[in-house]
Amino acid sequence: MASALKNLSRYADSNIPDAAEMRFGIVVSEWNAAITHALYEGCYNTLLKHGAQPENIHTVQVPGAFELPTGARMLNGQANPDALICLGCVIKGETSHNAYINHAVANGLVNLGIATGKPFIFGVLTPDTEQQALDRAGGQFGNKGVEAAVTAIRMAALKRGPAGGKKKIGF
């Protein structure tokens, strides 16, 4: 669904598991820092809101979005979190560099998730303009960092297994 049709910061609190016992890694790109730091703020505060303990949230910065998968792999090895959240922003600009960067980051995070069995959350904005990024980093469409944190909590809970039993569906 297009962000223009949905506020990224709105979700049902009742559907979010308690994060008190969970550990998180957050990897933040320094490129487009005003935007990525706003994403981080939304992400970090959402983790705390749902019970995550500050000492169980480990954060590192990397130079740019391209370095997010490598930073996430390193942080995974150092902190062993239940889920890793990667926050970045690649604005289209005048060339097609964004397509290469976004594709590489998405593939890198998918591969890490498959290889480790751990959630690596793609919290990277891929807008055409800086204004579109600002609109999604605390502006009129909410904050993608909030959405990334909620996704991380839900996926970490899924990895830990269903509460109250070992029912399996699917595979």
Image (spheres, rainbow, N blue to C red):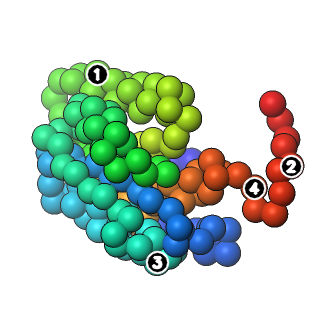
**Which amino acid, mark 4?**
Pro
The residue that label 3 is drawn on is 49
- Of the two numbered discs 3 and 2 in the rendering, the one whose residue sits closer to the viewer: 2
Q: For residue 162, which numbered disc appears in the image?
A: 4
Q: Residues within 10 Å of mark 4 (few under 14, many from 20)?
A: few
Mark 3 and mark 4 in contact (Cβ < 8 Å)? Answer: no
Q: Looking at the image, is mark 2 or mark 1 earlier in the sequence? A: 1
Q: Residues within 10 Å of mark 2 (few under 14, many from 20)?
A: few
Q: Helix, strand or loop at disc 4? A: loop
Q: Position of residue 171 (x, y in %)?
A: 81, 30
**Which amino acid, mark 2?**
Lys
- Of the two numbered discs 1 and 4 in the rendering, the one whose residue sits closer to the viewer: 4
Q: Position of residue 103 (x, y in %)?
A: 37, 25
Residue beneath the point at 45% across and 71% down: 52
The Cα atoms of the two marked residues, 4 and 2, are separated by: 7 Å
The Cα atoms of the two marked residues, 1 and 4, are separated by: 37 Å
Q: Looking at the image, is mark 1 or mark 4 earlier in the sequence? A: 1
The residue that label 2 is drawn on is 167
Residue 32 seen = no
Residue 24 seen = yes
